[in-house]
Image (tube, grey):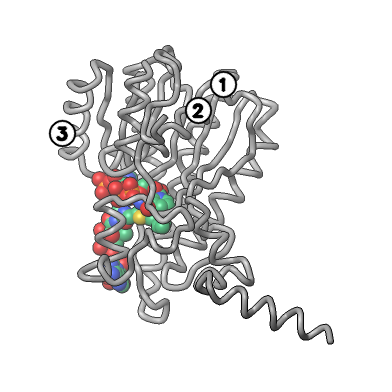
Amino acid sequence: MPHTKKMLQPNALKGKTIVITGGGSGLGKSMTKYFMELGAKVAITSRNLDKLKTTATALETETGGMCLPVQCDVRNYNEVEAMHKTIIDAYGTIDILLNNAAGNFISPTERLSANAFDTIIDIVLKGTKNCTLAFGKHWIDTKQSNGTVLNIVTTYAWTGSAYVVPSAAAKAGVLAMTRSLAVEWAKYGMRFNAIAPGPFPTKGAWDRLLPGNLKDKFDMAKKVPLKRVGEHQELANLAAYLVSDFSAYINGEVITIDGGEWLKGAGEFNLLEDIPKEMWDQLEAKIRSSKK
Ligand code: HXC
Ligand code: NAP
């Protein structure tokens, strides 16, 4: 069975309403498409309404589902509340929030202005907080007991990473919020989980993280033990499972989907991978002889 195959049974998300921030492009768009194929009604939000409308029309044509485009800059709480109201007015209820919107670019930290640092923190951490707070308060006030939040972080949320420090700090905050609210708001029936993707090529990420010929210089697949980057459908499969009722007992979890990439960087002796097979006879002999 190929890893790009669609995983869940048809209609697995029928009856669910899902809001995807940053759903007009990249991974957000791929996850949105699969949610629609599984029967969910969706709303996609971001700053660029034209892009959202184009995506919504294309996805409705491709899947036969419903996709509402709503403009919203997640950095602004008033805009988030207005976006939430627009979607409630249109659909009646919301069951699932996917915090996927993000901002990021590579830079030596000393080159960043205070505003540049704030911009990333504001989109990633404050944006996730704004949406989570607005949606969570509504679920509590209306006694809706199936609210589900899925946050997209990345593996450097726990390792940290040079040259993307604002993003690392913000994603770490999102991870802490995921785990904290998984416990605190479980009493209202809400679940909070996160996905930590490794490299999944998208225009948004690659233009900012591997600009120019960096794409050719740093082949991301080489950093991954499985020697390939991720396919969007693999991520969509995991996201659909985590927002579906099949994962009803999973709460407070972060699932890594990176082909083993971050562990390769972490294990002390993982670099021995570079030793050719033939050399192991000599090395073994040397080690054994050291006993004498
Ligand atoms: C230094 C920079 C900069 C750069 C912008 N700034 N780009 N500083 N190097 N390359 C500074 C600006 O000068 C300004 O500071 C401040 O950052 C805000 O910039 P604006 O352009 O005014 O901000 P805005 O229009 O809000 O755009 C936000 C953005 C942009 C983050 C800068 O790239 C964007 O819209 N990104 C959204 C999509 C995105 O980033 N996708 C990738 C996600 S990938 P001053 O002081 O001059 O005012 C991801 C993957 C993680 O998260 C893991 C991968 C494995
Ligand atoms: P992307 O296409 O650039 O997606 C980012 C989305 O966020 C865009 O649709 C953008 O839309 C939206 N956005 C940015 N600022 C916003 C704001 N202030 N308010 C509302 N929406 C905003 O990049 P991607 O690769 O698909 O990234 C999606 C998610 O995956 C992010 O959380 C990212 O950190 C995570 N991730 C990606 C990778 C990867 O390899 N691609 C790896 C790990 C984690 P507008 O510009 O229209 O606002």
Circles 2 and 1, Cβ within 8 Å, touching? The answer is: yes
Structural distance between the alpha carbons of marks 3 and 1? 32 Å
The three-letter amino acid code for the residue at tag 3 is Thr
Residue drawn 40% across the image and 43% down it: 100
Q: Which residue is mark 2?
A: 241
Residue drawn 20% across the image and 33% down it: 55
Q: Which residue is mark 3?
A: 54
Q: Nearer the viewer, residue 111 or 230?
A: 230
> Which quarter of the picture shows residue 236?
top left
Left or right of 199, for residue 44 = left
Left or right of 86, for residue 241 = right
The three-letter amino acid code for the residue at tag 2 is Tyr
Q: Which residue is mark 1?
A: 246
Disc 2 Cβ-to-ligand 2 distance below 8 Å: no
Picture quarter with the C terminus: bottom right
Structural distance between the alpha carbons of marks 2 and 1? 6 Å
Which of the two labelled residues, at mark 2 and mark 1, occupies the earlier sequence position? 2
> Which quarter of the picture shows residue 111?
bottom left
The number of discs equals 3
Structural distance between the alpha carbons of marks 3 and 2? 27 Å
Mark 3 secondary-structure assignment: helix
Which of the two labelled residues, at mark 3 and mark 2, occupies the earlier sequence position? 3
Left or right of 97, for residue 45 = left
Residue 105 in the image: above or below residue 85: below
Q: Quadrant of ligand 1?
A: bottom left
> Pointer 2: residues within 10 angstroms few (<14), some, or many (20+)?
some
Left or right of 66, for residue 50 = left
Mark 2 secondary-structure assignment: helix
Across and down, in percent, residue 71 comes to 26, 37
The three-letter amino acid code for the residue at tag 1 is Phe
Disc 3 Cβ-to-ligand 2 distance below 8 Å: no
Across and down, in percent, residue 90 comes to 32, 18
